[in-house]
Amino acid sequence: QSMPQKAFIYALPIELYKEHGIRRYGFHGTSHKFILDSTAGLLNKPVSQTSIISAHLGNGCSVSAIEQGEAVDTSLGFTPLEGLVMGTRCGDLDPSLPGTLQKKLGKTADEINDLLNKQSGLLGISALSNDCRTLEDEALKGHEGAQLAIEIFCYRLAKYISGYMVSVPSLDAIVFTGGIGENSSLIRETTMGYFKHFGITVDEQKNLEARFGKGGEISTSSSTTSVFVVPTNEEWVIAAEAAEFA
Ligand code: AMP
């Protein structure tokens, strides 16, 4: 809700926003809020002075850019299909593709919607599974589809995180959360590998140890920006916010 217009308005005729509410709304706000509050605690800073890029990686995936305690951009859009590669969702793609696929495959708009939401992402690329654990196991054994799915997932994620570095000038930390973000040292290591030339580096041992509910800082002492793993707790935020109305 705090995002500026430049972040949430699509480059479509402006009436679509004004009359039909077509804009980027974003999702996962409860998780990103929890991550912001927790990271501020870890950094010993007031939330209003904490700036992070938060990557919630579960079955649904999103990155939120948070400058001085306020969300300024996010990767999920009008629906939770935009942005990153997810378990079964494709994320960003050429907007002309749904129409082209509809004609090429002789499918209805609903069928294409189903293909983009339920048959794509990690599952679609690997032709194997949307479960990151299965993909990691099979990638290690040489499954090329699993290897490619992980490679694309991490590359797209790194591009989003680096893009949001322009949105968060006072960046304190990059934070991983969600089932994949909290547990997959491989995804974190591969993604953060793209940031070495920014001087952002991850400690191999700390990264391996951060899993199964154990979070904390995983960056090296010389890293120009901190990298954290923070277990999320969306239910807590929902309960706390609901309690305010009780
Ligand atoms: P969530 O939607 O946050 O519950 O996350 C679900 C995703 O987390 C699934 O893709 C799981 O494969 C992934 N996940 C859970 N545990 C692990 C793990 N130990 N290693 C890698 N991925 C995991």
Image: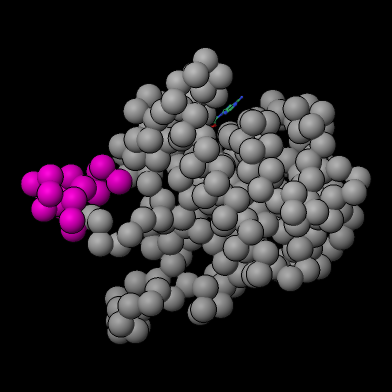
Query: The N terminus is located in which quarter?
Result: bottom right
Q: Is 3 situated above or below 113?
A: below
Residue 115 sits inside the magenta stretch = yes
Main SS of the magenta part reads helix
Spot the residue most to the top. 141
Q: In the drawing, does residue 227 fall left or right of residue 55?
A: right
Residue 101 coordinates in the image, percent (x, y): 18, 50
| Location of residue 93 by image quarter | bottom left
Q: Is 30 situated above or below 207?
A: below
Out of 195 and 77, give the one closest to the viewer. 195
Q: In the drawing, does residue 190 fall left or right of residue 79?
A: right
Q: Quadrant of ligand 1?
A: top right
Q: How is the protein colored in the picture?
A: one colour
Out of 242 and 143, give the one closest to the viewer. 143
Q: In the drawing, does residue 190 fall left or right of residue 46?
A: left
Residue 64 coordinates in the image, percent (x, y): 60, 58
Residue shown at 23% from the left, 55% from the top:
98
| Residue 113 visible in the picture | yes
Spot the residue most to the left. 106
> Which span is picked out in magenta?
99-116
| Residue 232 visible in the picture | no
Residue 18 coordinates in the image, percent (x, y): 35, 83
Residue 146 coordinates in the image, percent (x, y): 46, 27
